[in-house]
């Protein structure tokens, strides 16, 4: 199987989306000149070019793309060629309105933007595979081509009649009989038993709460339906004699795709990541997305899109301060990226994203954005031979599962204040601030190589996943679990006792009497090794063999256990405030013999090891000085280091 290494070799790819069809052709030579000056080695072309390539049904205009491919090759810039199927031309929606998606209430999602296609539509699929075949035939052997990029940010939901027919086929394959579906969905409730497949519809807008098991399966189906679209195009691109890597770009931590499943079908796992410069914890968010993507890839991965400055989709879109783009780019490399790319090369003057930044901004080549892009390109050129292809090793895994997230979002849940991504991010932040590098893992993965496994919140766990966690602990691993974990099976059926019995035995819990969600803004005092406040959630627990680490110290739960330890298993029945959660996870990590990458780190200093290199990244508000034992060579400045390392604001050092 091809890999990212086939496209990168001993270097880190650098570049971004290039949309030359938006500009006069006389602009192209200047683009190439500036790309070369900036150290650009790769451009992604064709992402939104369907209307230019196929201006009318069945017609093809490849002449402009021929010239771009040849131009890039002459100047030694590789091309990641995209299939343009994320944004069908207006003629498709006009001639074939059945290709347009419909909302939960049956309203049509019209063309005029992008992602306006029903993934179940045979007409859309026919046009998409046809243009993909022609792209593969024309450019599969072009010397500029380094990688294929299918579609863009798959994120379409549809509730139309064609989707309903597709959903029924998917359900037949999953359940075989209607009786089995009725059992899995619990349709005895509210007299919703189905007698025939034709009666089943997607979970459209309803009078009151919809069946959560139906909604869960529709989430599963939608991820699979989109994956079918991707696989159909991928199979065309890989059928030629010249087998090149294929990717499609994930949106970061997005609810619509089961990326564990998708990643198995990609040669290269890539992601678009846009931390908010106004977010004080943006660096941790970036690190979390990077850790998640690296774990899906199980090796080097690709930043397909990031912003060179401000974006355009927030209520207030602040730019990146000087040096921040470089810091975040090198953070991605530290956490396993072998390609760092941006959206986009030249900032658009028209259209919906004209206020979205680019490598070459409206200020032009003398603007500070382009000057900073040049510095990033130079840094990646220096680092490439030492870092490309190397790995990041972690002793801790955070468990994450899209199916549990989907089930967690159901309408009639105990607390609408509990948001799965918020809880996962809080746990990752605690370990990140403690200096502990983490992988992400699926609850069904082999966990034996990790010293500690953290489960922030997995409401839904299959029997196999529960057995896997039990076996992990019995095999000598340390397990730390958050609240409402293992409450439901894979059909979203609540388990007797409010938690799987095997997990209750593991955590030393006799019974969960009540789930006790906390109103917005309300906290509970807790008493343990140090006082802290519980947020978001609490539980009324009765222990069996567990030792109480912390208790609730007020209200109806006063004196009851909040945090338990049962040998190598810990259970946290709330979301402790950030310092307390960091202290708790650090304590568990110490017990599991997990150490931070670098001791005695000043606040704001991120330390990550990749291969034999130590990356030091300054996320503090000002300069930092850090002591690193031993003698080293700093690769970015090509200087020896023997003593304290000084980092300017947003500074980075890479020590060999």
Image: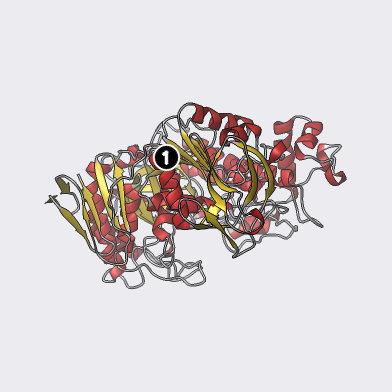
63 sits left or right of 186 in the view: left
180 sits left or right of 158 in the view: right
Q: Nearer the viewer, residue 477 or 271?
A: 477
Q: Position of residue 375 (x, y in %)?
A: 24, 60
Q: Position of residue 319 (x, y in %)?
A: 39, 69
Q: Nearer the viewer, residue 240 or 283?
A: 283
Q: Residue at x 70, y 60 (%)?
A: 108
Q: Residue at x 28, y 47 (%)?
A: 598
Instruction: Please name the residue that numbered disc 1 is placed on.
Output: 396
In which quadrant will I find the N terminus?
Answer: top left
Q: Position of residue 442 (x, y in %)?
A: 52, 37
Does the rendering let one see residue 253? no
Q: Give the image's coloring scheme.
A: secondary structure
Q: Secondary structure at mark 1?
A: strand
**Circle 1 residues within 10 Å: few <14, some 14–19, many ≥20:** many
Classify 474 as above or below 540: above
Q: Position of residue 656 (x, y in %)?
A: 19, 44
- Numbered circles on residues, count: 1
Q: Residue at x 35, y 49 (%)?
A: 435
Q: Residue at x 36, y 67 (%)?
A: 320
Does the rendering let one see residue 125? yes
Classify 303 as above or below 611: below
Q: Nearer the viewer, residue 282 or 224?
A: 282
216 sits left or right of 429 in the view: right
């Amino acid at each position: 199987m091809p890999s990212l290494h086939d496209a990168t070799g001993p270097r880190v790819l650098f570049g971004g989306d290039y949309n030359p069809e938006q500009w006069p052709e006389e602009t192209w030579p200047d683009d190439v000149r500036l790309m070369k000056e900036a150290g650009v080695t790769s451009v992604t072309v064709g992402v939104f070019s369907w209307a230019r390539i196929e201006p009318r049904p069945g017609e093809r205009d490849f002449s402009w793309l021929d010239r771009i491919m040849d131009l890039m090759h002459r100047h030694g810039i590789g091309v990641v060629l995209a299939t343009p199927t994320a944004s069908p031309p207006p003629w498709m929606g006009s001639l074939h309105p059945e290709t347009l998606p419909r909302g939960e209430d049956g309203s049509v999602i019209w063309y005029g933007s992008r992602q306006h296609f029903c993934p179940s539509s045979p007409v859309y699929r026919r046009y998409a595979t046809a243009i993909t075949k022609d792209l593969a035939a024309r450019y599969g052997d072009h010397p500029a081509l380094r990688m294929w990029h299918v579609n863009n940010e798959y994120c379409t939901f549809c509730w139309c009649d064609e989707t309903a027919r597709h959903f029924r086929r998917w359900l037949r394959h999953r359940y075989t009989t209607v009786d089995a579906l009725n059992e899995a969905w619990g349709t005895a409730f509210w007299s919703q038993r189905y007698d025939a497949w034709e009666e089943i519809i997607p979970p459209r807008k309803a009078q009151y709460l919809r069946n959560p098991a139906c909604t869960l399966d529709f989430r599963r189906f939608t991820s699979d339906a989109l994956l079918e679209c991707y696989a159909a195009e991928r199979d065309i691109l890989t059928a030629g004699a010249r087998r090149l890597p294929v990717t499609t770009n994930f949106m970061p931590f997005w609810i619509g795709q089961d990326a564990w499943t998708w990643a198995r079908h990609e040669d290269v796992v890539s992601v678009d990541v846009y931390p908010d410069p106004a977010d004080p914890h943006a660096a941790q968010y970036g690190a979390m997305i990077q850790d998640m993507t690296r774990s899906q890839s199980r090796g080097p991965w690709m930043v397909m899109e990031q912003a060179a400055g401000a974006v355009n989709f927030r209520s207030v879109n602040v730019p990146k301060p000087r040096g921040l783009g470089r810091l975040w780019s090198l953070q991605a490399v530290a956490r396993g990226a072998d390609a760092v790319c941006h959206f986009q090369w030249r900032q658009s003057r028209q259209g919906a994203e004209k206020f979205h930044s680019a490598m070459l901004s409206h200020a032009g080549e003398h603007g500070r954005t382009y000057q900073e892009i040049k510095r990033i390109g130079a840094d990646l050129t220096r680092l490439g031979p030492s870092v490309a292809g190397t790995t990041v090793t972690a002793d801790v895994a955070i468990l994450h599962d899209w199916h549990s997230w989907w089930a967690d979002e159901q309408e009639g849940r105990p607390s609408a204040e509990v948001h799965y991504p918020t809880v996962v991010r809080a746990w990752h932040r605690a370990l990140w601030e403690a200096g502990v590098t983490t992988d992400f893992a699926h609850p069904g993965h082999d966990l034996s190589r990790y010293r500690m496994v953290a489960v922030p919140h997995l409401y839904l766990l299959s029997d196999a996943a529960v057995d896997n966690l039990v076996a992990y602990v019995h095999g000598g691993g340390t397990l730390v679990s958050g609240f409402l974990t293992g409450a439901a099976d894979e059909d979203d059926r609540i388990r007797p006792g409010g938690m799987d019995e095997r997990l209750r035995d593991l955590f030393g819990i006799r019974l969960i009497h009540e789930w006790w969600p906390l109103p917005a803004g309300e906290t509970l005092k807790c008493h343990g090794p140090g006082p802290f406040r519980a947020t978001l959630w609490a539980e009324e627990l009765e222990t069996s063999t567990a030792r109480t680490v912390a208790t609730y110290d007020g209200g109806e739960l006063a004196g009851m256990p909040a945090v338990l330890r049962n040998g190598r298993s810990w259970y946290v029945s709330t979301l402790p405030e950030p310092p307390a959660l960091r202290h708790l996870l650090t304590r568990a990590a110490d017990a599991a013999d997990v150490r931070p990458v670098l001791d005695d780190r000043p606040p704001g200093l991120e330390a990550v090891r990749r291969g034999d290199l130590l990356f030091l990244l300054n996320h503090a508000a000002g300069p930092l000085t850090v002591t690193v034992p031993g003698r080293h060579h700093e690769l970015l400045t090509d200087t020896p280091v023997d003593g304290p390392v000084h980092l300017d604001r947003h500074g980075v050092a890479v020590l060999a």
